[in-house]
Amino acid sequence: MSSSSVLVINSGSSSIKYQLVDPETGDAIAKGLVERIGDPMGLIKHVHGDAVTEEELPVPDHTVGMREVLRLFDTEGPTLAEAGIVAVGHRVVQGGRHFDGPALITNEVRDLIEELCPLAPLHNPAHLKGIDVARELMPDVPHVAVFDTAFFQQLPARSALYALETETAEKYSVRRYGAHGTSHQFVSHEIAKLEGRDDLKQIVMHLGNGASVSAVKNGHPIDTSMGLTPLEGLMMGTRTGDIDPAVVFHLQRVAGMSVDEVDTLFNKKSGMKGMTGESDMRSVWEMIHNDDAPEVQQRARTAMDVYINRLLKYVGSYTAELGGLDVITFTAGIGENDHDVRRELAEALAPFGVKIDVEANKVRSGEPRVVSAPDSTVKIYVFPTNEELAIARQALTFA
Ligand code: ADP
């Protein structure tokens, strides 16, 4: 263990995820999760080395949750003092136009994050709960906000703006902010290091339950698939991704749905889950290959076709925007683990000289690796993202 560490906190509406990171080695010294905050019974899991501590106890609010986390560091180790904690990094989804990089959390910065709540009503209020209690309980170290949108503040106007009437767009801050920026920045930067050059035309596919793709040219993002919110873009575990906005009017007029009902339908009940009943890709593949009912198999296959086709459309349009393509990198739960998704996308790109190495692609590993054939026109990487490490390193700059 090196002498300094950073505590990374991701505070959600009913959970607090945390990881104590050694920013030099990238190791997670300890990590854990408080779940079901506000329910009659909460659940806490703390992992330190091989020791796993799980406790069920009521966690009525984030203050209690964070106190329990600090207690577990004290009793199960490592104590934050012995781990040499030098900063706390907080993941914040929406930084709006205010933040193009990490920010030391002062009272002013805290209030700006609060001001942005209307743009991220599910996320920013939950982050603030974690930020407020952590600042109170750990007043002696710098607290740093690392924004999911910061990397994409570099987007050129041509991809950041919607073709919406300007006055309305400006008055209500309607533009494309992107998300998963910490991951896209980290992965594209690491790939440039591996390739030993900065002048790369890259596409990064962050395919998890939430999914986004970015086009990065010479280290800078020029487009990304998420927009005002994480709803836009790729088909996801439970989100529609791109959809004609007129579907909203249609469902309101024809089905009598309220705005909140359409919001829930698009964000929580659509995507893979909405089309197949399952949001997890492993279950969808299982249906495609092994379900007894042909109509279930067919429905799952069709949903997968929609998923792959959406990826393909983004690769096509981003290659045109980039003026060529050197590298496609897959990351996050699906990107790192689902070799069939990678293979099917690569096969669809075969007319452009893209060739996947089928055997290399099948190898399961936690290491960064090349899965394209040597004569492929585009190099294909699998690179495990590490948002906690990226947040820790950014927080460290204020220590
Ligand atoms: P998030 O951070 O958005 O919750 P993750 O990046 O952890 O998501 O990805 C979770 C998703 O990854 C799961 O819903 C599942 O679809 C997919 N996944 C995880 N492991 C595998 C696997 N071995 N094969 C296929 N898909 C997987």
Image (cartoon, rainbow, N blue to C red):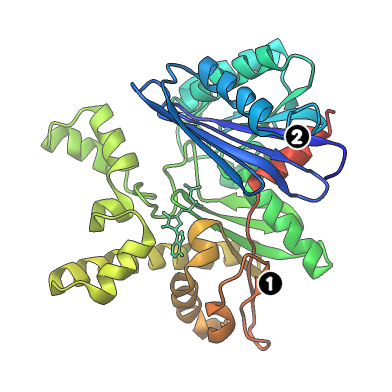
Q: Who is closer to the viewer here, 164 or 350?
A: 350
Where does residue 62 sit, x and y in percent of width and height? 51, 19
Does residue 311 appear left or right of residue 135 in this picture?
left
Distance from Cα at disc 2 to Cα at disc 1: 34 Å
Q: What is the quadrant of residue 382 in the picture?
A: bottom right
In this rendering, the answer to whether 337 lies above or below 357 is: above
N-terminal-most mark, 2 or 1 = 2
Looking at the image, the residue that sits furthest to the bottom is: 375
Where does residue 203 sit, x and y in percent of width and height? 61, 62
Query: Under tag 2, what secondary structure?
Result: strand
Specify whether residue 101 is in view: no
Circle 1 sits on which residue?
Answer: 326
* Mark nearer the viewer, 2 or 1: 2
Q: Going 36% across and 56% down the picture, which residue do you hit?
A: 280
Where does residue 94 sit, x and y in percent of width and height? 56, 30
Specify whether residue 262 is in view: yes
Where the N terminus falls, by quadrant? top right
Looking at the picture, which amino acid does disc 1 mark?
Asp
Q: How many marks?
A: 2
Looking at the picture, which amino acid does disc 2 mark?
Val
Circle 2 sits on which residue?
Answer: 6
Q: What is the quadrant of residue 297 in the picture?
A: bottom left
Does residue 72 appear left or right of residue 56 in this picture?
right
Q: Going 72% across and 28% down the picture, which residue do you hit?
A: 88
Does residue 395 appear left or right of residue 250 in this picture?
right
